[in-house]
Image (spheres, helix red, strand yellow):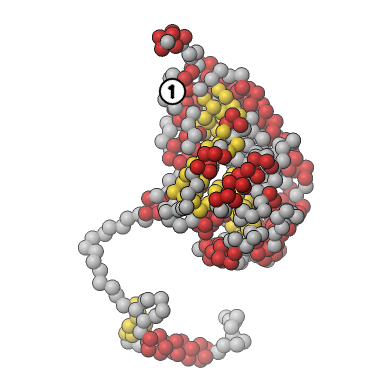
Amino acid sequence: MHSRYSDTVTVPAVFHLFKFVYIFVSSKGVHGNGIHHVSVNGSLYPAKAKSRRQRWEVKPSEMSNNTLNPIRAIVDGMKLTPNPDKPMIALSIGDPTVFGNLPTDDAVLQAMKDAIDSQKYNGYAPSVGYLKSRQVVANFFSCPEASLEAEDVILTSGCSQAIDLAISVLCNPGDNILVPCPGFSLYKTLAVSMGIKVKLYNLLPEKSWEVDLQHMESLIDERTSCLIVTNPSNPCGSVFSKEHLQKILKVASKHCVPILADEIYSDMVFPGCSCPSMASLSSDVPILSCGGLAKRWLVPGWRMGWILIHDRNDIFGYDIRQGLVKLSQRILGACSIVQGALESILNNTPQCFYNNTISFLKSNSEICFNELSTVPGLNPVMPSGAMYLMVGIDMDHFPDFKNDVDFTEQLVTEQSVFCLPASAFEYPNFFRIVVTVPEEMMVEACGRIREFCQCHYRPRSRDSNDLDQ
């Protein structure tokens, strides 16, 4: 077999090299890494430590014990038995590909096919991604207010890994992070597993889920290492205005707290709304912006995400950047084939594809909002982007149920419609609807929800009010 090294290193040379290493190591006795070795019959073996264990006792790590996904914790505990007379409609899954009605664009598929056929991307890529692919992402998201270069981009295995790396590089055990409530459950799952405390700041449904700025600021202390801002929002479907984002930045600037901007739904906003990136509005607050292909390009299974490092005043500096590089080396990074397709995906996907997706999501959101707005006891909040709509439940009118989990569980039993109870997002007495289902399915689901509510709705008792008086 031909060796890739055969032109430069001979077999005898390799033998003498190993002989030299052996003599060197034996003479040192203890390596710099603290591992003891002894020479036995001319070979090297680790010194055997004395065993203290008398029996098998293999326990899970503290990290694994501390890892809990609130959605799974709630959903797995629900008794979900659909009505056999009605086909199941799942409005709970944040995957736009589930029903097959929202395929990605042909240009996106062709980019992947070309990358595969080239056979240039079958090997390992650098842990932070190919330089060319990072430059492509930098070019795509760069703007005059927040320019980017290749070294400002870390490619990751989906946006979830980007969030993981961002939290990991900014926070130590004992620190705390500020997380929106309601908010994406992964933030808490990751933070708590690392010994990081989560402080929930309120979003206000009566103000289209804007941040309660006073409440958010009251949570900041000397151990606050990161403020997470999700815009557009999962689970709310809200889109913050430029003015509101500037108010959030003002709080972060005042207290010198960096921002993790979860912008996976960037540009998935309905007509009439704008969604500037946080970095484009920041003059001093350093920002790690997390995004990816999953939602806007409708390919969540391709696992391509990124971190955009915005640090115009060099506050993160070399250390944070190097920390992200080191953390990225814990695994082998983003899919190399998708990296090879990135340039074509970002540059050749037609605008009509994005427009059609947004048009569908807006139409479905309006259908859902209009239908449920007239259902007694329900209070939907109209979204402005992303793929979600939150619905408030006036539990006083539904005495048959203890809470939103009980309500949504019985909705499955009677109507075969599954909406995610918002307790999974730390926000009880709401439920979240995913608006990516086919239109006729959305209409059917809303009709069933109406029927369910009409069956269980009870007006407030005037008699009880009179007695209270």
- State the count of labels: 1
Residue 256 vertical placement versus 365 (above, below): below
Residue shown at the point (31%, 57%) measured from the top left: 58
Residue 198 vertical placement versus 74 (above, below): below
Residue shown at the point (72%, 37%) measured from the top left: 273
Which three-letter amino acid code belongs to the residue tagged 1?
Phe
Q: Is residue 299 left or right of residue 30?
A: right
Q: Is residue 335 at least partly visible in the picture?
A: no
Residue 268 vertical placement versus 43 (above, below): above
In front here: 183 or 137? 183
SS type, badge 1: loop
Quarter of the figure that contains the N terminus: bottom right
Q: Is residue 105 left or right of residue 317?
A: right
In front here: 453 or 396? 396
Q: x and y percent of residue 118 in the render?
A: 71, 63
Q: x and y percent of residue 327 in the render?
A: 52, 62
Residue 166 vertical placement versus 239 (above, below): below
Residue beneath disc 1: 401
Q: x and y percent of residue 393 in the render?
A: 52, 25
- Residue at the extreme left: 54
Residue shown at the point (24%, 64%) measured from the top left: 53
Q: Quadrant of residue 30?
A: bottom left
Residue shown at the point (48%, 18%) measured from the top left: 397
- Residue at the extreme front: 254
